[in-house]
Image (cartoon, grey):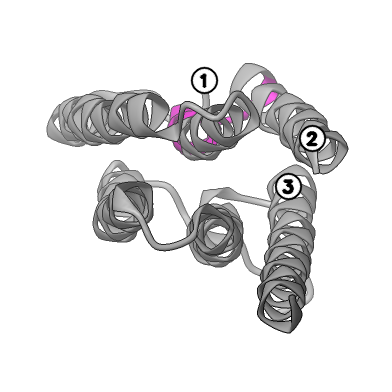
Amino acid sequence: MSQNELSEMARLFITSVAIGLMLVGLFFLFVAAVGVLRLPDVFTRSHAVSLTDSLGTLFILGGLALYQGLSTNLIKILIVLVLLYLTNPVITHATVRAALRSGLKPWTREDE
Amino acid sequence: MKIFFLFVLITITLLIGVYLYRVLRGPTVFDRVLGLNGISTKAIILLVVIGTFYERVDMFVDISTGYALLNLVGSLAIVKYLEERGKSFDVSE
């Protein structure tokens, strides 16, 4: 009976840690959205899209993987995570390089 | 727990609206590409969360893997096209 209660408590602990991770991830995604809305040009906005977004994705998918427990689904979610971490910087770098080569000037403050 | 997943789904959907604003209004075409990239990242997360919500993660994770690869190929094709056009292309559109 005590063994049963212990596993119940472990389950509750893992679930609450997963919820905490997903809330942190939602916070980072919110910061990324604010950056996309407020920053002045492509080169600054690419930070919001690539860096903050990747961190939020890491936290949300990590929380979901933790919630799954030890199974095939955990491996699959980790594969999606690794794939996102490989593709997201590549796309952002290609976009910013194309913007630079097509003659777009990076934003500077007017009084400099 | 279902309520919490519903909350995550609704929040991410609202965040997609912000990126959609950037895609529609973005001053240059590269802003639109970046916005589309952000939307597809959100869509991948959304698919995994939907899978957890309906307890069919094994199926939805495969779909999101395919979506990530399609996003990579599509975005690289668009960006490469824009880069090859070079300076003859009016970036202020």
Q: Residues within 10 Å of mark 1 (few under 14, many from 20)?
A: few
For residue B52, side relative to residue B10 (left or right): left
Residue located beneath label 2 in the image: B2
- The magenta stretch is B25-39
- Expressed as whole percent of the image width and height from the top left, the position of residue A83 reads 26, 52
Residue located beneath label 3 in the image: A33
Q: Secondary structure at mark 3?
A: helix
Q: Are marks 1 and 3 on the same chain?
A: no
Residue located beneath label 1 in the image: B93
Which secondary structure class fits the magenta region best?
helix
Q: Residue furthest front?
A: A1
| Of pointers 1 and 2, the one earlier in the residue sequence | 2
Q: Secondary structure at mark 2?
A: helix
Residue B36 is one of the magenta-drawn residues: yes
Residue B33 is one of the magenta-drawn residues: yes
The relative height of residue A108 versus residue A50 in the rendered view (above or below) is below
Q: Quadrant of the N terminus of chain B?
A: top right
- Expressed as whole percent of the image width and height from the top left, the position of residue A64 reads 56, 53
